[in-house]
Structures are given as structure tokens and as C-alpha cells.
Image: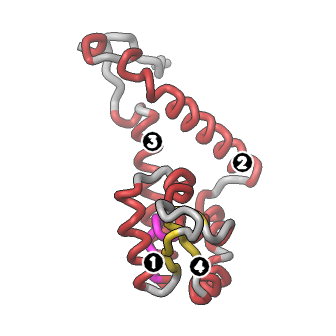
Amino acid sequence: MHDPTPKSDELRSLAEMLCFAIYSTSHAFNRVYKSVLAPLGLTYPQYLAMVSLWECDQQTVGGLCAKLGLESSTLTPLLKRLGAAGLIERRRDAHDERQVRVRLTGAGRALRARALRIPDGVFKLTGLSIADGLRLHREITRLREALDRSLPGAESELSLAEVE
């Protein structure tokens, strides 16, 4: 039987790389969401921003960036497109003009009703049981948190000198 753990002098094949499994799965999710979201006129990142606003309206741009794991330079154009579509409004905070607040419009709130069944519908496409889906979610979240914690010192822990 083949040992799936490569020795230090072996390169993992693409099919064996955890990062590629997650990357390619992310692309598969994006393809599914693209077809499901097209009738709503939303891209997947726009949908995530809307879900965040449906959970808690009138967030700051900085707060949305933190929740979505996006840079302001990525989120701002996305919010401009949602604003042009009439789904959100962006305004300077009355108490702190450095902050921009994002709020849903009536059309943005109404869109939520059309999007309610999307998560369950996409989950069914995974073929996972609810228990397996919850377990996988916990494991992926733990993995992301571990990687996020490693970022400040990642360069010192894995240098190109060690790789070469």
C-alpha cells in the first residue's frame, strides 16, 4: 500500500496537496453560486456582502472588510456596483466622518426573500449529511484560523532557504 505522506525530498503531486483540494473546491463552489446567483444579478462576493448586511445592517466598510476577509481596495468597487444596482447606500458616519457606513435600501432588503433558499440548495448539491457538513465547516474554520495565526511569523518559520 502506498504511504500518502511524502518524504522530505519528495514533491507532493497536485492531487495530494491540501491547498489545491481547497482551492479547486472553492472554484467549484463559485461555479455553482454563479449559476444560482445570476437571476439575482449578484456575483458571489456581492452575495457575501449582502448576506453580511442582511445579518447586520448599517455596518462600516472597515467592519465589512474584516468580516469578509477583503481589503478595502477590493470591497469598495464591489460596494459601488451594489449601490449602482440600488441595493445599498454608502454614507459618511455622522459621528465619525472617517467611517463610511453601508446600509441596505428597500430593494436590498427585499432581495433577501429571493435569496433565502440558496444556502440550503447549494448545501444539498454537496451530497454531505448535515453532521458531515458541520464537521467539515469546523475543520476548515480551524484550518483558516491556524493559517491566520501563522501569518505574522510565517516568513521566519518557512523561509525559501529551507525550501531550497
| Element class at badge 1 | helix
Q: Secondary structure at mark 4?
A: strand
Q: Which mark is residue 104?
A: 4
Q: Which residue is mark 1?
A: 82
Between circles 2 and 3, the one closer to the viewer is 2
Q: Can the viewer see residue 7?
A: yes
Residue 109: which disc?
none
Q: Which residues are magenta?
A: 41-47
Q: Position of residue 17 (x, y in %)?
A: 41, 32
**Residue nearest the viewer, comparing 151 with 61:** 61
Q: Position of residue 35 (x, y in %)?
A: 46, 75
Contact? badges 2 and 4 (CB < 8 Å): no
In the rendered image, residue 46 lying in the magenta stretch gets the answer yes
Q: Quick check: 2 left or right of 53?
A: left
Q: Nearer the viewer, residue 141 or 62?
A: 62
Q: Residue at x 58, y 35 (%)?
A: 145
Label drawn at residue 134: 2
Residue at label 3? Answer: 21
Q: Nearer the viewer, residue 24 or 164?
A: 164
- Which one is nearer the viewer's eye here, 144 or 49? 49
Marks 1 and 2: which is nearer the front? 1
For the residue carrying disc 4, how many other residues have a C-alpha within 10 Å: few (<14), some (14-19), or many (20+)? many
Q: CA distance from mark 2 to mark 3?
A: 18 Å
